[in-house]
Image (tube, rainbow, N blue to C red):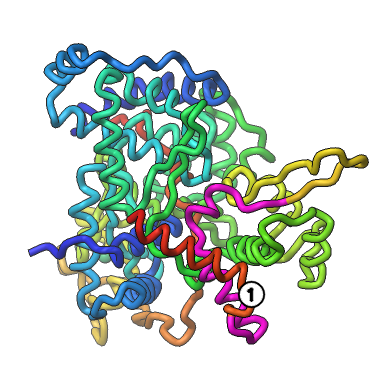
Amino acid sequence: MSQRRKVAASQGKRRSQAALENDGGEDVSFTQPTSSQLQRARDNFTSVQVDHKAAEVVQFILIKDQKKIPIRRTDIAKHIVKEYRAVYQDIMVRVGLIFERVFGMELVEIDTKSHTYILINKLEPTTEEPLSLNPKIGLLFVVLSVIFMKGGVIKEAVLKNTLKKLRVDFEERHDEFGDVKKLITEEFLRQKYLEYTRVPHTDPPEFEFRWGIRAEKEVSKLKIIELVGQLHNQDPQIWTQQYREATSQSSQSSQRS
Amino acid sequence: MAQPMGDSHRRFLQAIMSLGIVDESQANALHRSCCEQHGVNYDQRSLDDFIGAINVQLQPVFIQIRTGNSEEDGFQYRALVNMAETDVTRLSSDYAENELELFRKTMDLIVESESGSASSMDILNSADTLLTRKLKKKEAELVLQKFVQDKWLNEKHGSYSLSTRCIIEMDQYLRNTYQDLKVCHVCNNIALQSQICDNPMCGIRIHIPCVARFFKGNSDPHCPECKDFWPHEIPEIQRPPSSQHQRLSENAAPSTSGRPSTSQSRRPRR
Ligand SMILES: [Zn+2]
Ligand SMILES: [Zn+2]
């Protein structure tokens, strides 16, 4: 163990530096090996070696995920998989199994062109738990529920006004959330919880918010609508359209798993 | 026999991952809520088995939920430990090369001190001697603040000690790096903030909370090793603050990503 660690440590600086510098680079050519190439590669590496690589990839992805940075296939291949590239698929299958069985998470490709992945939580979503862990997630749930109840898209100005009524001001520092504007228009976007686009043909430009891909995958619309129902002391079924959408999402996800 | 891993275990693991370290009451609260959310029978006594089942699964990826005690209050904590000192953990670090060097220097000062702590003045002076890139006093102060925020160091009245999280995570590293590192005579864990036997031929260390338990009700305490009189104050045993349950959010640690890796400074002393 200690020998391995020493070797790894001596390579560490160079490799990690490269990883950081290349974060903005392009996807290098990533050709699928032919079946005979694959067979030869499989013969070259023992199952233990492939498991070990898979463990390194898991760590790499977990670290990126701490900051909710999307993970690119190129970075995994270049910085971790390296000379094991021929068995990349084998490694990633094991990585996927580890995330599912041990962590209750799933690696999802969000961009098939650049081969970018995010890690999403596969466990039944709950609203109580993340709220108590992190006040920012509380704000996120409010924003998501406002968007959802407005039919899936909301103008920035409308969102600002709605939040103002809840005493959360875009332009002011909030005790719990810090810089609200930055949180909503930068952090939540980067984490793929929200999508922020310019409304076409607007001058001066207007912007609107939608649910991001992470929210679509991780957040239960049924829980959101139940939460809204509790707040308004209403049966969530009175919002027929939203309720239909929420129940269809939950039946889809139960089919998926 | 190990329990199989279920969703209650996975949710517990996810929570520990985002918190970094939890005290025992938080661990119990989490255990309970994870069991309840997934319809599993909750038994408070089974927390160790519950965590054991998670650790079995984590072992192949060199991660572990490890138990340790605070040197200050003696209470038990659980922390997520990354055991692979690979370049991957190096990448995870939020610190620049010279900041890491300052961290190692701070560790040196703390471990070599009798009190298990180092004054901010001594640490800041050592910032002048960094080999990678010197830090100005102001910069070094900010870096120290960051170490405290990220829960690697504790600060009290301008003196710094290693945090519980740091001691749990870096246990092996500390033992490998500092050959004359002392362990507690009572609990066998690394002893930094502790009482030391006055007999220069003996010099054993006992953690302050361990002293409290070991010499409880003893009006004439003697060193368990050399039998000399134990001349230090015997503190009261601290009770866990059961009435004032901390909310998890107050203790939300910035996860494992902030870990200052020390893998490059492995060098036996003397
Ligand atoms: Zn002790
Ligand atoms: Zn003695």
Q: Which residues are magenta?
A: A209-235
> How far from the left and from the top, in percent, is residue B113?
40, 49
Main secondary structure type of the part rendered in magenta: helix
Which corner quadrant of the image does residue B133 belong to? top right
Which corner quadrant of the image does residue B235 belong to? bottom left
Identify which residue is drawn at 55% across, 64% down: A245
Chain letter for mark 1, please: A
The residue at which mark 1 appears reads as A239
| Residue B109 visible (yes or no) | no
Residue B182 or B51: which is nearer the viewer? B51
Identify which residue is drawn at 21% across, 60% down: B5
Magenta stretch: residue A213 in it?
yes
Where is the C terminus of chain B found, in terms of image quarters? top left
Identify which residue is drawn at 26% across, 52% down: A101
Magenta stretch: residue B209 in it?
no
SS for dot 1? loop
Crowd class of label 1 (few under 14; some 14 to 19; many from 20; radius 10 Å): few
> How far from the left and from the top, in percent, is residue A78?
40, 20
Residue A129 or B143: which is nearer the viewer? A129
Ligand 1, seen in the image, is in the quarter at bottom left
Q: Report the side of A169 relative to B106 (left or right).
A: right
Point out the residue furthest to the left here: B1
| Residue B48 visible (yes or no) | yes
Residue A226 or B246: which is nearer the viewer? A226
Residue B167 or B21: which is nearer the viewer? B21
> How far from the left and from the top, in percent, is residue B1?
7, 64
